[in-house]
Structure formats: C-alpha cells, structure tokens
Image (tube, rainbow, N blue to C red):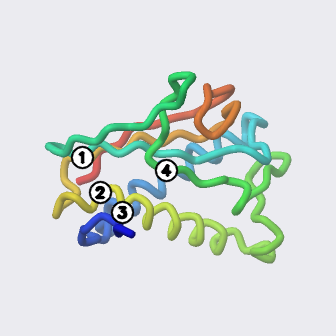
Amino acid sequence: MRDHTPDFKMHELSGSNKALVAGTVRQLLEKLAADGKLGADSLLEFWVEVPGVKHSRGTFRGGFLMPDSFVYITDYFLAGETSLVPMPAFSGEEEKAWADLFDELFYQIEIFTSPVSESKGITLELWAGNRQRPEGEWIYAVDRKIELG
C-alpha cells in the first residue's frame, strides 16, 4: 500500500496574518448571525490561491466547485437573538469558542499554504453561509477575499 500523504513542511501563519483572518472571520460570522441566517448546516469555507502553485479544485457531477476546506460554524456557535452564542460545550465562554474555531481554521490554512515558505501574496477567499450540500450552490452567503502579507 502506498502512502499518499504529501511531503511538505508546515509554516505557521504570522501574528499579523492570524489577526487579519480572525478579524475577517468574526465580521462574516457576526453578519451571518445578525441576518438570521446561521443554521445547523452553516459553513465557514475558504479557498486558497498560492502564487506560482497550480492547484486544481475538485468538482462533482453537477459541476459544483469544492472549497479547499470548511468548518461547521455550529460546532462552535449558535445564533442568539442579536449575536453569536457559544455552544454549551464551551460553558458560555465566547473567547474559548473563538479560540478553538481559530485553532482549527489556522491549522487548515497552514496545511494549504505549506507549498511556499512565506505567506506574502497568498489570497484567501472566505465564505460563511448555507449551501444545499457542503459542495452545492449557496443559498445564502457572505464572503470576503483577503491577501496575506
């Protein structure tokens, strides 16, 4: 049996890139909750564009574009009347829920950005919302594209 694990070295995101991603994600999720669109199947997705690296994105029979990765938002938060509420597993500690979400997200981003030694020029396209399926058409979404420095 062959090992298909890619051979790469992980590069941790810089503090300024983590702050940029975290601030953007908070805005997207707060907008999603404020619009009353945060549901059990809501996703936070991202696509990664690395300069000089060919990266084919998978498609399904229906022609849907697969994101590089996604996180179920309701693993961390529920929608309150006017804001996000941490899941009961976090004992009402909102910052702990954010920290866990960001730990998972940063780890995934670091995997997809590992082919290059620095993050300058890497573009992240972040989406939060609801799809028909994880790989299907967006029913409702908010998005933002950011470039890492």
**The label number, if any, that marks residue 50 in the structure image:** 1
Crowding at mark 2 (Cα within 10 Å: few <14, some 14-19, many 20+)? many
Tag 2's secondary structure? loop
Mark nearer the N terminus (4 vs 2): 4
Crowding at mark 1 (Cα within 10 Å: few <14, some 14-19, many 20+)? some
Mark nearer the N terminus (4 vs 1): 1
Q: Amino acid at mark 3?
A: Ile
Tag 3's secondary structure? helix
Residue at screen point 65% across, 46% down: 30
Residue 131: x percent and y percent? Answer: 66, 33
Residue at screen point 58% across, 47% down: 44
**Badge 1 vs badge 3, beta-carbon distance below 8 Å:** no
Residue at the outermost top position: 62
The one nearer the camera, 67 or 2, is 2
Mark nearer the N terminus (3 vs 4): 4
Q: Which residue is mark 4?
A: 69
**42 left or right of 145?**
right
Residue 144: x percent and y percent? Answer: 45, 37
**Badge 3 vs badge 2, beta-carbon distance below 8 Å:** yes
Mark nearer the N terminus (1 vs 2): 1
Q: Which residue is mark 3?
A: 111
**Badge 3 vs badge 4, beta-carbon distance below 8 Å:** yes
Tag 1's secondary structure? loop
> Marks 1 and 3, Cα distance to the nearest angstrom?
12 Å
Q: Amino acid at mark 1?
A: Val
Residue 142: x percent and y percent? Answer: 57, 33
Q: Amino acid at mark 4?
A: Ser
**The label number, if any, that marks residue 113 in the structure image:** 2
- Displayed quadrant of residue 140: top right
